[in-house]
Amino acid sequence: MGKAKNIKTAINRVAVQKKTHTGILNNKNLDKIFDYIEKTKSRQAGITLVALIVTIIVLLILTGITITLALNDNGVVGKAQHSFEIYALKSAEEKVNLAYTTVKEEIISQVLNDVNYNASSNENTEILGNIVRTELPEKEWFIKTNIPGIIYITYYNDSIEGKLESYLMLDSQNVILYIDGKRLDNIGNDNNKKSVLELKEGEEINYIDCNGNIIPCIVLYGSDSEDNYGIQIVTKSLVKDSNGNDVTVELGNGTGISQASYEEEHFEKARESYNTETSKLNRISNEYLNTDLAEYARSIGSNPSAEPILDEENTGNFTSNIIQPYNYNNKFKRGFGSGKDGTQMRKVNINCYKIGKNYWEARGGTYTVTNKTAVLFRTIAWNGSGTCFDSQLCAITSEGVVSSCSNTYGLRPVFKLKSDIYYIEVNNKKILTK
């Protein structure tokens, strides 16, 4: 406003000095001029502010679009990550090929010195596996040699999504390399994958768990099974922990003692263990699930026609006049599990159920003694001779006396295989692959 007054004063002075006609630059006309100037300035300021806001919004939109295009899968960052993954896996494949060549040369050297040399023996599998470990010392490499004749090699890098699976399948005096199920050797490329849908009951096959451990298994339900359960395999023996020891599971009152306890607290723990046995065994079995190969894992004895139960309530629908006076009706399950697996194991072959070790079957139920003086709550287990037996967890007498005990046996998971995976076979050794 100050500038406008200065302009007005200057014009008045010019008008006086030149004695211009007062009708042209009189005070009234001057006021109109200054009002116009003020309105023009305000309108220009308003237009400038709006333009600035619009410009900022447009820049923000363009920035967002640029960032999105840069970070999505098809953007600069996504393409760079994809290129890195391809390079990492290709580099890993080249390293496996070098390790394979070293093993091949070692076998040739040993055969020249000993015509009876057998590369697939347990001892030589471990020796050759150590050669591979020397060739591939980095932390991204995992080498397993727990199955004679197979060296399982996995490359896994946290910075990439994919992983590389390869096998050195040892013959008596030869080695064949498989990378992601494709055979690569001196003969050239040979896709030797076979669909798991071809597997039949009783066939032995090696399963790779989520930790990269090779677990020998037997086909429990195969393509030739009468029941439509898909391809399901059961571990050939008990699963092992990271130290190579048999995994065992305690069921019962938690004391670790098979001798009967008459304490109420122990009885309640045994009641819960009985009611939730299936979910407990299934959850532990699930720790060995490799989602690349199997849909789910469950304990032997659980329902083979449905996905495994992983959580159960400590309750049930069992009622009896014996336990009713002591308020134990509807606090126990009447029964659980399925006898189908046990029947199928006997059908398949003796090696399927007689494994020389005791193990749980996720199946159990109640039993009322003949004279109706007690109700027993029992679960099923198998002994090393291949005979199933009842393992009592707790009991209630007609006089209201409660008792419980604890038992510890091994675990045998069952895996339902995905229908779109494969297996490779060398010298009657089968191993699953994607």
Image (cartoon, rainbow, N blue to C red):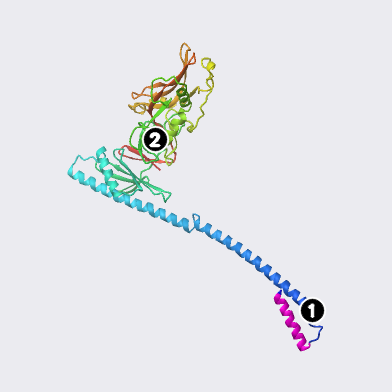
Query: In this rendering, would 394 be left or right of 41?
Result: left
Q: Nearer the viewer, residue 295 or 349?
A: 295
Q: Position of residue 74 (x, y in %)?
A: 49, 56
What distance separates the C-alpha of mark 1 from that of mark 2? 104 Å
Q: Position of residue 58 (x, y in %)?
A: 60, 63
Q: Is residue 9 within the magenta segment?
A: yes
> Quadrant of residue 433 in the image?
top left
Q: Does the residue at mark 1 contact the one at mark 2 (Cβ under 8 Å)?
A: no
Give the structural element (helix, strand or loop) at label 1. helix
Mark 1 burial class by Cα count in 10 Å: few <14, some 14-19, many 20+: few
Query: In this rendering, would 346 be left or right of 130?
Result: right
**Residue for badge 2:** 199
Residue at 78%, 76% (x, y): give it.
32
Work out which quarter of the rendered image holds the N terminus and state it: bottom right
Residue type at mark 2: give it.
Leu
Residue at 71%, 79% (x, y): give it.
6
**Residue for badge 1:** 29
Q: Is residue 165 within the magenta segment?
A: no
> Quadrant of residue 170 in the image?
top left
Judge whether 283 appears above or below 36 on screen: above
Judge whether 309 appears above or below 189 on screen: above
Give the structural element (helix, strand or loop) at label 2. loop
Work out which quarter of the rendered image holds the C terminus and state it: top left
Q: Which residues are magenta?
A: 2-19
Sooner in the amino-acid sequence: mark 1 or mark 2:
1
Mark 2 burial class by Cα count in 10 Å: few <14, some 14-19, many 20+: many
Q: Nearer the viewer, residue 323 or 190?
A: 323
Residue type at mark 1: give it.
Asn
